[in-house]
Image (cartoon, grey):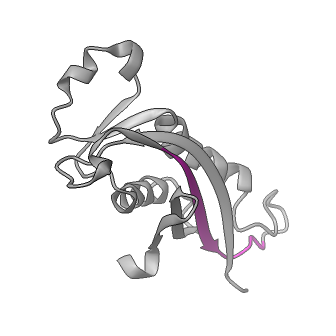
Amino acid sequence: MAKIRLTKEFRFEMAHALWNYNGLCKNIHGHSYILQVTVIGEPCRNETDPKLGMVMDFGDLKRIVKDEIVDKMDHSIVLNRVADYKNFINVPQLFDRIHIVPYQPTCENLLVDFAERIRARLPEEVSLFSLKLHETANSFAEWYAEDNE
């Protein structure tokens, strides 16, 4: 049977700052992110399976991405662990959704992180094909499994 790709789109708001960067993005700023997640697999052929004809239930994909990415990152701030972030932790009313990550929180590095999280949760018969993360309306980064094998 043919391989089929499914794509689901997610939207969330997130702030970040790029530590030691030489441009405006060194300042805390936010984006309206659009994340497109594409998986690939063969549609189920088991006549008794309620998922007959599906590569994956869109609802299951939505649950994985919301659990791993959207619900955690929406309305949060992401900072590199080498940044001097300790004062933020002392202001919980403004910074109770802060993520300290072991990388520079660029669009590119966020995709690598997101790919690892999503891949770990997919059913065995389904593979992550690609991710596309729009940071702005006209700027985005893409991750493809075939480039990372």
On the image, which quarter does residue 83 sit in? top left
Q: In this view, does 2 lie to the left or right of 16?
A: right
> Would residue 112 be visible to someone looking at this image?
yes
Q: Residue furthest right?
A: 47
Q: Is residue 141 above or below residue 65?
A: below
Residue 148: horizontal and vertical position, in percent? 36, 76
Residue 50: horizontal and vertical position, in percent? 82, 56
Quadrant in the picture for the N terminus: bottom right
Q: Which residue lies furthest to the bottom in this view?
A: 1
Q: Nearer the viewer, residue 146 or 86?
A: 86
The residue at 60%/61% (across/down) is 36
Residue 14: horizontal and vertical position, in percent? 47, 40
Quadrant in the picture for the C terminus: bottom left
Q: Nearer the viewer, residue 42 or 24?
A: 24
The residue at 55%/65% (across/down) is 138
Q: In this view, does 132 lie above or below 65?
A: below
Q: Which of 116 and 54 is in front in this view?
A: 116
Q: Is the magenta stretch mostly helix, strand or loop?
A: strand
Q: How many marks?
A: 0
Tell me where the magenta segment starts and ends, as one range.
31-45
Q: In this view, does 20 lie to the left or right of 107?
A: left
Q: In this view, does 56 lie above or below 149?
A: above
The residue at 74%/70% (across/down) is 44
The residue at 58%/62% (across/down) is 37
> Would residue 149 be visible to someone looking at this image?
no
Residue 65 included in the magenta stretch of the image: no
